[in-house]
Amino acid sequence: MEEMVNRCYVFEPVDLDVKDFASEGLILDIGGGGEGVIGRLKGKEVVAIDLLREELEEAAEGPLKMVMDARDLKFLDNSFTTATAFFSMMYLDEREDQRKVLAEAWRVLKAGGRLHLWDIDLAGRPETEKEMYLVHLRYHIGGEMKETGYGRRWPQEPRGAEDYIRLAEEAGFQHIATERTKHVFYLVFAKPVQGRC
Ligand SMILES: C[S@@+](CC[C@H](N)C(=O)[O-])C[C@H]1O[C@@H](n2cnc3c(N)ncnc32)[C@H](O)[C@@H]1O
């Protein structure tokens, strides 16, 4: 962790309230390994998929855990009413991979389903020599607070909330809401009932 911090530009810590959200049936959590925050929030309602087995093994018990590539989901069309991506999009280095994940999320969601997406706003990259960045989160679920850090190489292109909204709209989603906490954002999208608009 210390070595990681030395290589990283560390963003100011963020206190993020991970609020419960309405959902019906199973929730698909994309990149749900690691801290498994959505699994902590929603427990057995969650199907957590992750590319890496060890990340799923590390995550808290509760969700059904499956090793799967979010760019090529093995679920049938219209399987879920809710999908989540909690600081997972930042781990997709290529914009094309982000597009694929959003297209797959759209495909497996039922019409009227929701996608909840939390991530870091990298639109205005700070001036730094550091090759990577680290998001230092103090996340609050119910009355409990936990601390974690998510680190990655700087992406080639700007990645702000508006860029994610545009990408999700290109995939067919409708943007419903944005909440910001410092440099962290929470976006909610819907799959329109009439299909692509
Ligand atoms: C560090 S976690 C992010 C936080 C996690 N959602 C949590 O609650 O702690 C990001 C995860 O995305 C996973 N990931 C990256 N690319 C992926 C892909 N193509 N398909 C599925 N998971 C992927 C990584 O393996 C990693 O476990």
Image (tube, rainbow, N blue to C red):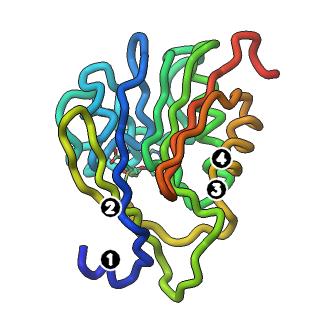
- Residue under circle 3? 160
* Front one among 141 and 154: 141
Q: Secondary structure at mark 2?
A: strand
Instruction: Identify which amino acid the numbered label 2 is placed on.
Output: Gly
The disc at residue 4 is 1
Q: Is 23 drawn above or below residue 167 in the view shown?
A: above
Left or right position of 42 against 50: left
Q: Secondary structure at mark 1?
A: helix
Q: Is 15 drawn above or below residue 31 in the view shown?
A: below
Of labels 2 and 3, earlier in sequence is 2
Q: Secondary structure at mark 3?
A: loop
- Residue under circle 2? 149
Q: Quadrant of residue 187?
A: top right
Left or right position of 49 against 142: right
Taking the spot 65% from the left edge, 21% from the top edge, the residue there is 191
Instruction: Identify which amino acid the numbered label 3 is placed on.
Output: Gly
Q: Are marks 1 and 4 in contact (CB under 8 Å)?
A: no
Dot 2: within a 10 Å radius of its alpha carbon, few (fewer than 14), some, or many (20 or more) residues? some
Q: Position of residue 18 (x, y in %)?
A: 36, 37
- Residue under circle 4? 164
